[in-house]
Every structure is written in C-alpha cells, then in structure tokens.
C-alpha cells in the first residue's frame, strides 16, 4: 500500500481525467505507475545493451543479414 500527496493542480488534473474517462483516480494512478516502471526497466535494459556494444560484447546485424539468416 502506498499513499502519496499530489500538488493541487495535479490532483485536479487527475480528477478531471478520471471523470472524462469514467475511471477511478486510483485506476489511473495504478496504470501510470505501472507504465512508468516498465519504461524505467526498458531503459535499464537498453542501457545494458549499449554498454555491451561499447565493450564489444554485443553484435549488431543489418536488416539484410537478418533476412538472410531467417530465409525471408
């Protein structure tokens, strides 16, 4: 369980959006938090790949190479 305080302007925006979408404020906040956490995880994964590329531990392939490998 998490409790948070939002600035008044954000609270009004949340309430207005929830009403327009016919959803609860809690549902919108849950969805936003999940999406943000997924974005953070995706960025961490891409950063890890970039570090491996920079160290020469990861290889890239052209579209043509992929098509040939997959016999497309």
Image (tube, grey):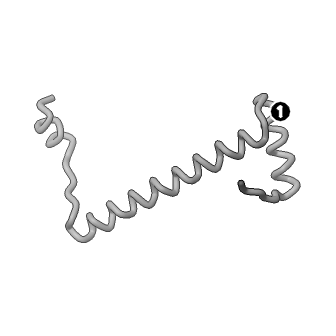
The picture places residue 56, in percent across and down from the top left corner, at 20, 67
> Left or right: where does residue 16 sit relative to residue 45?
right
Q: State which quadrant residue 26 falls in.
A: top right
Coordinates of residue 71 in the picture (x, y in percent): 11, 31
Residue in view at x 27 percent, y 69 percent: 54
Where 13 sits versus 47, above or below? above
The residue pinned by badge 1 equals 19
The residue located at (83%, 33%) in the rendering is 19
Q: Quadrant of residue 59?
A: bottom left
Q: Is mark 1 on a helix, strand or loop?
A: helix
Residue located farthest toward the bottom when viewing the structure as drawn? 55
Counting from the top left corner in percent of width and height, residue 57 is at: 21, 65
If the image is split into quadrants, where does the N terminus sit?
bottom right
Residue found at the very far front of the displayed protein? 1
Q: How many dots with numbers? A: 1
Q: Is residue 45 above or below residue 32?
A: below
Q: Where is residue 11 in the image (x, y as percent from the top left)?
A: 84, 50
Q: Which quadrant of the figure has residue 50?
A: bottom left
> Which residue is nearer to you in this view: 26 or 19?
26
At a point 32% along the width and 67% down the height, the residue shown is 51
Relative to residue 19, is residue 69 drawn left or right? left
Q: Quadrant of the C terminus?
A: top left
């Amino acid at each position: 369980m998490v409790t948070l305080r939002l600035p008044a302007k954000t609270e009004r925006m949340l309430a207005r959006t929830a009403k327009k979408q016919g959803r609860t404020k809690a549902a919108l906040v849950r969805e936003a938090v999940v999406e943000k956490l997924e974005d953070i995880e995706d960025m961490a994964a891409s950063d890890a790949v970039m570090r491996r590329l920079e160290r020469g531990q990861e290889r890239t392939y052209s579209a043509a190479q992929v098509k040939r490998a997959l016999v497309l």
